[in-house]
């Protein structure tokens, strides 16, 4: 009976480890308000369309620098930057500075851009 419990616990743990990365936890964690950049803030292409395509890689590299999911963050950030030519300032949040980047959603309605 004890071995059956161990197998069940191991199976539950394995399922959690496999499927946990697939869930979007951004909606669960409340985002504290980020500091607001000054009105003339253009360093990250905060004005829609203000970046050139070659500026996307360095902006996304900084944007994704604090995440443990670097590869998907870089992929989607560069995809969003190529479309919107804008990357929000900072490593998280501040999407209100790039409306195109902020409003692009997945099929399920979640945020497309990191």
Image (tube, rainbow, N blue to C red):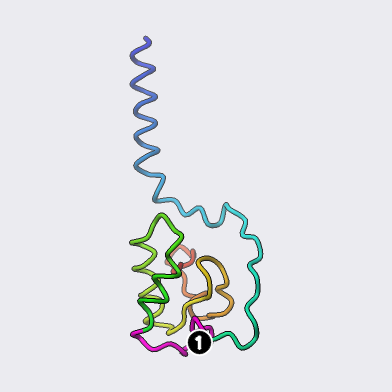
For residue 54, above or below residue 111:
below
Task: Return the x and y of residue 4 as percentages of the image width and height.
Answer: 35, 15
> In front: 40, or 73?
40
Q: What stretch is highlighted in magenta?
A: 43-54
Quadrant housing residue 39? bottom right
Magenta residue check for 46: yes
Q: Which residue is drawn at 65% across and 60% down?
A: 32
Q: Residue at x 43, y 70 (%)?
A: 62
Magenta residue check for 33: no
> In front: 58, or 69?
58
Q: In this view, does 100 lie to the left or right of 75?
A: right
Q: What element carries label 1?
A: loop
Task: Return the x and y of residue 57 as percentages of the image width and height.
Answer: 35, 76
Task: Return the x and y of residue 105 as percentages of the image width and height.
Answer: 47, 70
Q: Mark 1 points at which residue?
A: 48
Q: In this view, does 98 lie to the left or right of 53?
A: right
> In front: 40, or 14?
40
User: What secondary structure do most residues of the magenta stretch adopt?
Assistant: loop
Q: In this view, does 41 lie to the left or right of 10?
A: right
Badge 1: how crowded within 10 Å, few (<14), some, or many (20+)? some
Q: Which residue is drawn at 40% across and 38% down?
A: 16
> In front: 35, or 112?
35
Quadrant for the N terminus in the image: top left
């Amino acid at each position: 009976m004890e071995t059956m419990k161990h197998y069940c616990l191991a199976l539950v743990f394995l399922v959690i480890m496999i499927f946990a990365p697939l869930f979007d936890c951004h909606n669960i964690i409340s985002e504290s308000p980020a500091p607001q950049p000054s009105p003339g803030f253009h360093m990250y292409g905060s004005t829609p369309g203000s970046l050139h395509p070659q500026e996307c890689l360095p902006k996304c590299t900084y944007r994704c620098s604090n995440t443990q999911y670097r590869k998907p963050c870089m992929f989607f950030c560069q995809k969003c930057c190529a479309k919107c030519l804008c990357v929000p300032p900072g490593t998280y949040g501040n999407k209100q500075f790039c409306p195109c980047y902020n409003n692009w959603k997945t099929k399920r309605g979640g945020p497309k851009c990191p």
